[in-house]
Amino acid sequence: MEVQGRIKMVGETQTFGSNGFRKREVVITTEEQYPQHILVEFVQDKTDLLNSYQVGQQVKISINLRGRDWVNPQGETKYFNSIQGWRIEALQAEASGENMPPVPPADAFEPAGDLKEGDHDDLPF
């Protein structure tokens, strides 16, 4: 699965436990009618993938959904979900028009002067 959006926050790498488990989080904001702020975590060696990204960039992140259960001290089972990223890539800003080629002004085109009244156009409307 994939999720796209603009980076809102890139966290620092956190290390846990004696085995050195590493985790780093990024939040992206989707660009849709009701924008969502999605937290994606990268773990172990994948934390380094975020080094070259910064707030404001548009990205596409390949993700896996993860789920686990936990039994609390009262014996109740609780379920937790996480979104784990395994690839991230920068997107070009197509929507903003930054990479669009310039459109020449209308006066750069010459009108067709060799049309004859007898010529018919074959447009269907």
Image: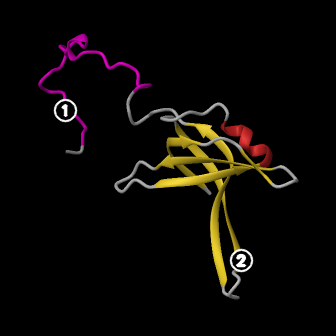
Report which quarter residue 89 is drawn in. Answer: top right
Label 1 is placed on what type of residue? His
Return the x and y of residue 20 as percentages of the image width and height.
84, 49
- Which residue is under mark 2? 70
Residue at mark 2 to residue at mark 1: CA–CA distance? 76 Å
For residue 59: magenta? no
Give the dominant element type of the magenta stretch: helix, strand or loop: loop
Q: How is the image coloured?
A: secondary structure
Which range of residues does the magenta coloring cover? 98-123
Query: Is residue 97 or residue 37 the one in the foreground?
Result: 37
Residue at the outermost right position: 19
Residue at 73% from the left image edge and 38% from the top image edge: 48
Q: Earlier in the sequence, mark 2 or mark 1?
A: 2
Return the x and y of residue 91 as percentages of the image width and height.
54, 36
Label 2 is placed on what type of residue? Trp
SS at mark 1 in the image: loop
Q: Counting other residues with Cα less than 10 Å from the Cα at mark 1, is it few (<14), some (14-19), or many (20 or more)?
A: few
Q: Tell me: 7 left or right of 120.
A: right
Please tell me whether mark 2 or mark 1 is closer to you in this view.
2
Give residue 51's mark: none
Give residue 120's mark: 1
Residue at 79% from the left image edge and 44% from the top image edge: 45
Return the x and y of residue 82 as percentages of the image width and height.
64, 63
Q: Tell me: 55 left or right of 80.
A: left
For residue 118: magenta? yes
Return the x and y of residue 73 as percentages of the image width and height.
71, 83
Residue at 20% from the left image edge and 12% from the top image edge: 107
- Which quarter of the figure is the N terminus placed in? bottom right
Residue at the outermost left position: 117
Q: Tell me: 95 left or right of 52.
A: left
